[in-house]
Image (spheres, grey):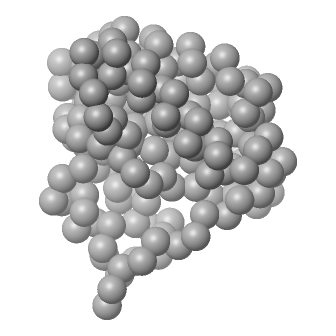
């Protein structure tokens, strides 16, 4: 069976849960997980669990972490209404209400932050993995589950000589 990506659900003005990861976090095991014949939700949960314990592509720390944190907060009200986010060493979780198309929003986020991060690291080329995971929030219970997941994600941090992860949230 050939694996194909499901189309992104682009709902401007509706809450979205989005996950994206560093390009170098990709490895054979992660690619194998993405090809498994499971529901997209189950697949993404397995991928997130793996990323939470992997040190591959763990660049989101120190000055890079601070820069990305500030960047994501500064876009609140411009590209999206920011509800919560967590920055892990090799991936980011967002809970937002997009103010523009998801494709444009993600291109802006990943493109702009990639240039800044590569500048800090003295690198060039691809920083973020090409794809991202998104899920439209269905109701208040789903919203609360996603918010709690994002809030608790930094607690799963594995020690890879990482200088931290960050959570930001305003929903209470």
Q: Where residue 118 sits: x, y (%)?
A: 33, 22
Q: Is residue 96 left or right of residue 36?
A: right
**Residue 138 vertical placement versus 147 (above, below):** below
Q: Which of the 4 image quadrants contains residue 157?
A: top left
Q: Where residue 106 sits: x, y (%)?
A: 58, 43
Residue at the image position 24 percent from the left and 50 percent from the top? 26
Residue that sits furthest to the bottom in the current view? 1
Residue at the image position 23 percent from the left and 41 percent from the top? 24
Residue that sits furthest to the right in the current view? 13
Residue at the image position 51 percent from the left and 55 percent from the top? 133
Q: Which quarter of the figure is the N terminus placed in? A: bottom left
Q: How many labels sit on residues?
A: 0
**Residue 18 vertical placement versus 93 (above, below):** below
Residue at the image position 48 percent from the left and 20 percent from the top? 68
Q: Looking at this view, is 86 or 133 the one in front?
A: 133
Q: Is residue 128 left or right of residue 145?
A: left
**Residue 146 vertical placement versus 38 (above, below):** above
Residue that sits furthest to the front in the current view? 124
Q: Is residue 20 left or right of residue 75?
A: left
Q: Which of the 4 image quadrants contains residue 172?
A: top right
Q: Looking at this view, is 172 or 63 the one in front?
A: 63
Q: Looking at this view, is 166 or 1 the one in front?
A: 1
| Residue 117 visible in the shown view | yes
Q: Which of the 4 image quadrants contains residue 159?
A: top left
| Residue 168 visible in the shown view | no
């Amino acid at each position: 069976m050939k694996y194909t990506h499901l189309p992104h659900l682009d709902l401007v003005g509706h809450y979205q849960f989005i996950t994206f990861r560093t390009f170098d976090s990709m490895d054979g095991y992660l690619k194998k997980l993405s090809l498994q014949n499971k529901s997209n939700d189950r697949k993404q949960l397995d991928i997130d669990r793996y990323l939470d314990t992997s040190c591959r592509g763990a660049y989101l720390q120190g000055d890079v972490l601070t820069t990305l944190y500030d960047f994501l907060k500064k876009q609140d009200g411009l590209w999206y209404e920011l509800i919560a986010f967590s920055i892990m060493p090799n991936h980011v979780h967002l809970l937002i209400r997009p103010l523009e198309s998801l494709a444009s929003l993600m291109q802006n986020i990943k493109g702009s932050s990639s240039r800044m991060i590569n500048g800090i690291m003295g690198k060039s080329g691809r920083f973020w993995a090409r794809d991202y995971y998104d899920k439209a929030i269905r109701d208040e219970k789903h919203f609360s589950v996603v918010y709690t997941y994002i809030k608790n994600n930094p607690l799963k941090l594995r020690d890879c000589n990482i200088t931290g992860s960050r959570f930001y949230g305003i929903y209470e």
